[in-house]
Image (cartoon, rainbow, N blue to C red):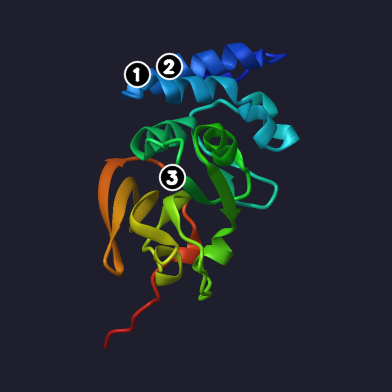
Amino acid sequence: MTLTQTRTTPTDFTAARRAMIDSQLRTSGVNEEFVLARMLSVAREEFVPAAARNTAYIDRAITLDNGRKIAAPLFYGMMLTEAQPKSGDTVLIVDAGSSYMKALVEPLVASVDEISPEDAAAKKNSRKTYSLILVDGAVEHIPASLSKRLADDGRIVTGIADGSVTRLAVGRRSTNDVALLPLAELGIPRLAEFDKPVSWSF
């Protein structure tokens, strides 16, 4: 559904989901059948504030009650495509507050845990590791506290912010580091907890 299609009331959410598939995902190259099936089956309108239900399928981010944002549907479609979740995966989701990503992924994998951006960025040691980490937002960097949660050869899919530009990015854990490969430029809500410390120059 595009911005010009949001004035129809009452909203037929099933039709809105199909329009999202046809006019947002397929036209942007998201054609994996498992991705389309999951996004068609999950009622996105249940993961936005009540006042935003009629615009749940527009092609832009929506502000949540906590002040954060749920990204546009295309972000989730592209993220699932890059993640290729498997039945044996143990997944950690850094969630901005909607739990929409968890609903999309949970039936596809062995287990899903969810943490807030604050917990993900905090300097805490966690012994539990995951084969797949999904970050629901754009970050300037992946802190050690989060990269340590990724199992050896585990993979991560996230948004990455470079100034005002945000892109989808994928990476794998190698030795003690996670290297990210930026992909398509995409509008992704930023998670300020992952901003790099400001450095001073004279």
How crowded is the residue under tag 1: few (<14 C-alpha within 10 Å), some, or many (20+)?
few
Going by the numbered disc 2, the residue's amino acid type is Ser
Residue 2 seen in this snapshot? no
* Residue at the extreme bottom of the image, as rendered: 202
Please tell me whether residue 110 is drawn above or below residue 58 in the rendered image: below
* Residue holding disc 3: 188
Q: CA distance from mark 1 to mark 3?
A: 19 Å
Where residue 116 appears, x then y in whole percent?
Answer: 59, 58
Q: Helix, strand or loop at disc 2?
A: helix
Q: Residue at x 52, y 13 (%)?
A: 18
Q: Quadrant of residue 148?
A: bottom left
Q: Earlier in the sequence, mark 2 or mark 3?
A: 2
Q: Are marks 2 and 1 in contact (CB under 8 Å)?
A: yes
Going by the numbered disc 3, the residue's amino acid type is Ile
* Residue holding disc 2: 23
- Closer to the camera, 10 or 22? 22
Q: CA distance from mark 2 to mark 1?
A: 6 Å
